[in-house]
Image: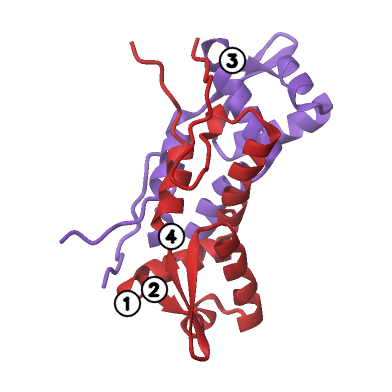
Chain colours: A purple, B red
Amino acid sequence: MSLPTTIEATACCVPRVTAAPTVEDAERVARVFKALGDPTRVRLLSLIAAGAGGEACICDLTEPVGLSQGTVSHHMKLLADAGLVTREQRGKWAYFSLNADTMDAAADALRVAAPRS
Amino acid sequence: MSLPTTIEATACCVPRVTAAPTVEDAERVARVFKALGDPTRVRLLSLIAAGAGGEACICDLTEPVGLSQGTVSHHMKLLADAGLVTREQRGKWAYFSLNADTMDAAADALRVAAPRS
């Protein structure tokens, strides 16, 4: 019987899914995955990862996903609020880069703690 | 410049988020994360992980999350459809266990492919 007794906090405070018994912990974990749970946002993350220097201008994101800048901005705000991307304003345009720490923390949160024999 | 050129399929065909350029791939990835993106479902996964033998009867899941069996069944169906849990009927009750392969595949999908120097 494997009983997770402690909350394993990861880099940016995403507790492990399988050891997140409190409502607050579960909400924190779910918020990150909810941000990832949309095909457009997955494609936006992919486009940013493929961008020169691992970043992308919002002006280059609208056409590939076929959505208006307002809609893309809304998706980018959800990703930024979840800590998955970092936003930097340069003159007229916003540039986005992936936050690898949050991506890693979300990945760690999914690891099933297997009992060691 | 790091350009993901191929879809990295993982154990249960969840492509890497940062290398999922097609609409179909993005939808497949997003479906798993959408299932994870709800606090009740995170708590249900946690309860199953903490259950004896890494499984739990649906009859033991309703009280901890404070929801009706119908609502819990609905959440469990979404988790099962996403491949995150496996369902086994034993007499009157359904028993659920985590599908570690899908959890691992989802974790792998979040790894940012860092350019090797």
- Residues behind callouts 4 and 3 on a single chain: no
Determine the CA span between mark 1 and mark 2: 6 Å
Work out whether mark 2 precedes mark 4 in sequence or the reverse, and give the earlier one: 2
Q: Which-is-in-front pick, marks 4 and 3?
A: 4
Q: Mark 4 points at which residue?
A: B99
Q: Report helix, strand or loop for mark 2.
A: strand
| A99 left or right of B75 in image | left
Q: What residue type is labelled 3?
A: Gly
| Nearer to the camera, B57 or A23 | B57
Q: Which amino acid does label 4 sit on?
A: Asn
Circle nearer the N terminus (1, 4) = 1
Position of A5 with respect to A94 (left or right) is left
* Residue sitting nearer the eye, A63 or B9: B9
* Same chain shared by disc 2 and disc 4: yes
The numbered disc on residue B52 is 1
Q: Where is residue A10 in the image (x, y as percent from the top left)?
A: 37, 44
**Mark 3 = which residue?**
A51
Task: Please rate how many residues cluster around mark 4, counting C-alpha atoms within 10 Å: few if below 14, some from 14 to 19, many from 20.
Answer: some
The residue identified by callout 2 is B55
Which residue does the image show at 27% across and 68% down from the upper left?
Answer: A2
Q: Is residue B47 above or below residue B26?
A: below
- Name which quarter of the figure residue B70 lies in: bottom right
Indicate left or right for B42 with A115 as reference: right
Q: Which chain carries label 4?
A: B
Q: Which of B51 and A73 is in front in this view?
A: B51
Please state which of the two labelled residues, at mark 1 or mark 4, is closer to the viewer: 4
Q: Is mark 3 on a helix, strand or loop?
A: loop
Name the residue located 42 percent from the left edge and 61 percent from the top edge.
A20
Please give left or right for residue B54 compared with residue B26 in the image.
Answer: left
Kindly state the secondary structure of the residue where label 1 is placed.
Answer: helix
Dot 3: within a 10 Å radius of its alpha carbon, few (fewer than 14), some, or many (20 or more) residues? many
